Image (tube, rainbow, N blue to C red):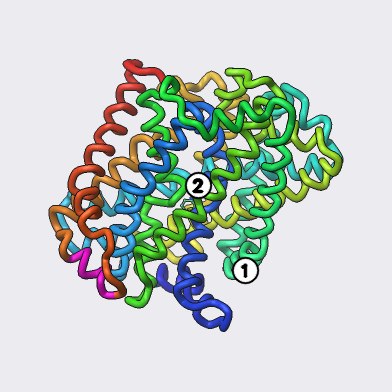
Amino acid sequence: MRKEESTKHLLQKGGSRSAFSGKLGYVLAVAGSAVGLGNIWRFPYLAAKYGGGIFLLTYLILMLTFGYALIVSETALGRMTKRSPVGAFGTFGKSIPFRFGGWINAVIPMLIVPYYSVIGGWVVKYLFEYLRGGTKTLAQDDYFAGFISNGMEAEFWFLLFSLLVVAVLFAGVKQGVERVSKIMMPLLVILAFFVAVYSMTRPGALAGVKYFLIPNFENFSWMTVVAAMGQMFYSLSIAMGILYTYGSYIKEDVDIEKSTKQVEVFDTAIAMLAGLMIIPAVFAFSGGDPDTLKAGPSLMFITIPKVFASMGFGTGAGILFFLLVLLAAVTSAISLAESGVSTFEDQLGFSRHKSTLLMGAVIVLFGSASALGFGVLDFVTLLGMSILDFFDFLTNSLMMPVAALSTCVLVTRVVGLKKIAQEVEQSSEFKRKKMYGFFMRYLAPVCILIILFSSIASVLGWITM
Ligand code: PHE
């Protein structure tokens, strides 16, 4: 299977270098896929919007229970079947529910990567402006709104970012990109740490630190749960077929529980650092203005430039920050697009060339709609949302819960918890086996039904987002 070849290097690279063991190589590959715009851009804006500390608490609980169980399941199913999602579901049955379960997992990344690339384009634009020394301009209040409402400009930067992603897929130099990212990821963590400390020590920022870290039940709403769950899927790359595929490349020597824990810790640490960079800055620079807190997708682009404009080496910090974020975004976008390309190759029998072109066309089509949705297409609203927000909502709040439910049903009704346990136990004792069974049987379906019900209710206007 070509798909296997295309991603295998990620895992083998670890094994062939003396400094990495195969297991560490695997953890790094999964962590590399997990860490992206989801951590740096999406997590802080959701935390700001949906209640601060209470959002964080909900997120952490869900991640340690529900998220944990799903990562273990997807990885074990991938390793057991040696297939990516469509094939993995197909191993257990050929009827429509099995096809549906596989395909919904496989289609999600194809729908995410177009709008992901639009945000990637915003990052490139900001990097470019910092390089031109526009530190003060970027920090102006309405700069970001002005930029995205000029749809043509946003479209230009989006196309540039997509071109980069598609070019890497064509050239097949992913390995080089991954290697660079392994050096730059730690740099991103260090820089984020310093920016977070700077941001938290601004006058007035403490209120933001408290808002982010201390749960206040008054800020709780159903949407807190829905948003936290969607974010958990997004950030950990769950319910989008990715972990099936990664699981299919590992051998029995990888301790699935341990690697899951390591990935969760790493991914959450970066998301929290991003939260500590951005949320205290909202309080320091706009006094905790509720409108800014609820700014949504634009939050990072509004507050971070203000932080940089207020510090000594702002331009240098801006260049470095957006460069590192760009890299995290490119590697994630490549892994999302790669998943689409290999589905086309395996399931439609297309050549790699043709599959890449098709993926490129999907990116340009849906991505352009998302980029122009704040400009010339701003009269288009889908379920009351801009096009970009709609794609985000469609994938995270509707499709991923269904994909996760498919995995739960596959595990509990078809494969059986016992067989998953056996798969995990091939490499190590399954420490949380009892809890795992409980999560998969009861907690996960209940959570999924809550998120689905709330999403539909919010579409129908019964609850507000
Ligand atoms: N988890 C990534 C993020 O947080 C998004 C992603 C999902 C990337 C799946 C690759 C594969 O941004």
Compared across the picture, whether 218 is left or right of 436 comes to: right
| CB at disc 1 and ligand 1 closer than 8 Å | no
User: Does dot 2 land on a helix, a strand or a loop?
Assistant: helix
Question: Residue 52, how many percent across, how many down?
Answer: 51, 30
Helix, strand or loop: magenta stretch: helix
Residue 376 numbered mark, or none: none
Few, some or many residues within 10 Å of mark 2 (<14, 14–19, 20+): many
Question: Residue 50, how many percent across, how many down?
Answer: 47, 27
Kind of residue sitting beneath label 1: Arg
The residue under the point 58% across, 18% down is 290
In this rendering, does residue 349 appear at all?
no
- Name the residue beneath numbered marker 1: 179
Q: Which residues are magenta?
A: 419-426
The residue under the point 63% across, 52% down is 163
Few, some or many residues within 10 Å of mark 1 (<14, 14–19, 20+): few
Question: Residue 179, how many percent across, how many down?
Answer: 62, 68
Determine whether 443 is above or below 171 in the image. Answer: above
Kind of residue sitting beneath label 2: Val
